[in-house]
Image: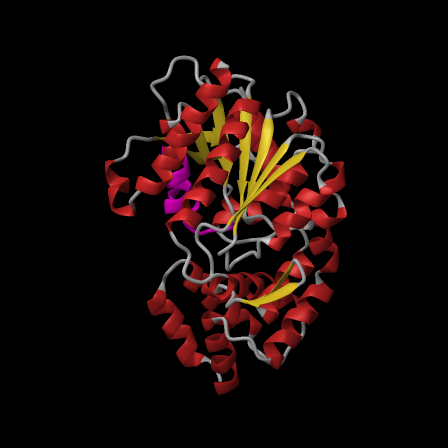
């Protein structure tokens, strides 16, 4: 009974932290920037949120593909909120993902990082691991590696992760989500298109200046807008037109054709990174959460993940929906959704005790 009550107290503290978090307060938060030994022996950045609780459990949050890495406000929000719930929280940098490079090696980085962090003075063997967005799929793949089985994590939490790269990319092309015999149209986030073209445009033969367009996208990822404009000025009219559509997430038949060609050309890599092809072999308890308003990865991907992982628990939160999927949601709806989230995370904390 005490464990049950404590799990709800932790859940409420955690969700309260998420609700009250403000980006302009980040500089005032208490965290420690340290290092861990990377895949090739290099010092790699590690941000840690230490709790004041005695003998706490630890949570490792693996990032998605983002140039902000451990400094991403979403990562900091999760780290701070979980620390408030009584955990030491570790945010390791994965260099390729900071550079938005999608390669098989990222999976090796995850399993290696897990083993290295188990050596940290503040971590015991009761570790929970979390994977965000693209990083969630990498984490699920890495969980089958022997390096993550000795000892295995208590559980995996997947947040906003895809099930099949093919269907996730189809969402970027069409903006369609099919759920319970209904089809919804949502404007995909332009970031997904940028990542696709940055990684794969140079792998196919086109009439475009792939080298300079890829470099331009690299500068866009790094928020170097002056350099973006400098390169754009040197491009042909057709190249500029393509770049403008990529940067603004505008999909026409030409963009669609290029994406389909990139998928076909990189099929072996994409199948390796796609949970659809291997996730049935994941036997670690997996908690899956996805926001219904996610314009980067449609929530139906997490529904598919849950359907294919035997030992899984799923929460789709409609608390903040796209206007295409709801209308005039009132206070009672919000309360109901908040209760669903509290129950889900209470079970999560209770399971990992």
Please say if 35 is above or below 305: above
Magenta region, main secondary structure: helix
> Is residue 88 visible to us here?
no
Query: Which portion, as a residue range, is magenta?
Result: 65-80
Q: Residue at x 44, y 30 (%)?
A: 11
Comparing 246 with 187, the one in front is: 187
186, above or below 28, in the image? below
Identify which residue is drawn at 72% across, 65% down.
265
User: Is residue 251 part of the magenta span, yes or no?
Assistant: no
Quadrant for residue 199, please give it: bottom right
Q: Is residue 298 left or right of residue 260?
A: left
Rendered location of residue 203, percent (x, y)? 65, 66
Q: In this view of the protein, which residue sits in the foreground, 233 or 8?
A: 8
- Residue 123 location in percent, x, y? 49, 19
Left or right: residue 39 versus residue 304 is left
Residue 95 in sight: yes
The answer to which of 322 and 110 lies nearer the viewer is: 322
Q: How many marks?
A: 0
Name of the residue lying farthest toward the bottom: 237
Q: Is residue 332 toward the left or the right of residue 133 in the image?
A: left
In this picture, residue 243 sits left or right of residue 114: left
Give coordinates of residue 165: x percent, y percent. 66, 56
Q: Position of residue 188 (x, y in %)?
A: 52, 65
Is-magenta flag for residue 66?
Answer: yes
């Amino acid at each position: 009974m005490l464990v049950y009550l404590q799990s709800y107290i932790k859940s409420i503290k955690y969700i309260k932290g998420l609700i009250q978090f403000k980006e302009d307060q980040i500089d005032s938060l208490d965290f420690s920037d340290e290092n861990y030994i990377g895949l090739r022996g290099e010092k790699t950045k590690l941000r840690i949120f230490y709790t004041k609780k005695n003998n706490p459990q630890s949570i490792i949050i693996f990032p998605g593909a983002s140039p902000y890495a451990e400094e991403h406000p979403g990562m900091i929000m999760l780290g701070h909120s979980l620390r408030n719930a009584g955990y030491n929280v570790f945010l390791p940098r994965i260099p390729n993902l900071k550079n938005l490079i999608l390669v098989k090696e990222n999976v090796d980085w995850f399993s290696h990082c897990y083993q290295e962090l188990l050596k940290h003075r503040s971590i015991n063997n009761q570790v929970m691991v979390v994977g965000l967005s693209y990083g969630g799929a990498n984490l699920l793949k890495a969980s089958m590696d022997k390096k993550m089985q000795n000892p295995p994590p208590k559980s995996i939490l997947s947040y906003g992760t895809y099930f099949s790269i093919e269907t996730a990319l189809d969402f970027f092309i069409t903006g369609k989500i099919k759920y319970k015999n209904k089809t919804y149209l949502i404007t995909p986030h332009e970031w997904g298109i940028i990542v696709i073209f940055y990684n794969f445009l140079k792998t196919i033969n086109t009439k475009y200046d792939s080298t300079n367009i890829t470099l331009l996208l690299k500068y866009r990822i790094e928020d170097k807008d002056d350099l973006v404009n400098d390169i754009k000025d040197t491009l042909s009219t057709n190249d500029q037109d393509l770049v403008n559509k990529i940067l603004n997430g505008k999909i026409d038949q030409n963009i669609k054709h290029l994406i389909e060609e990139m998928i076909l050309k990189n099929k072996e890599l994409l199948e390796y990174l796609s949970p659809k092809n291997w996730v049935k072999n994941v036997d670690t308890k997996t908690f899956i959460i996805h926001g219904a308003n996610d314009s980067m990865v449609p929530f139906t991907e997490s529904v598919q993940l849950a359907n294919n992982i035997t030992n899984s628990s799923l929460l789709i939160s409609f608390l903040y929906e796209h206007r295409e999927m709801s209308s005039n949601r009132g206070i009672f709806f919000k309360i109901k959704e908040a209760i669903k989230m509290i129950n889900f995370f209470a079970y999560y904390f209770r399971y990992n005790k």
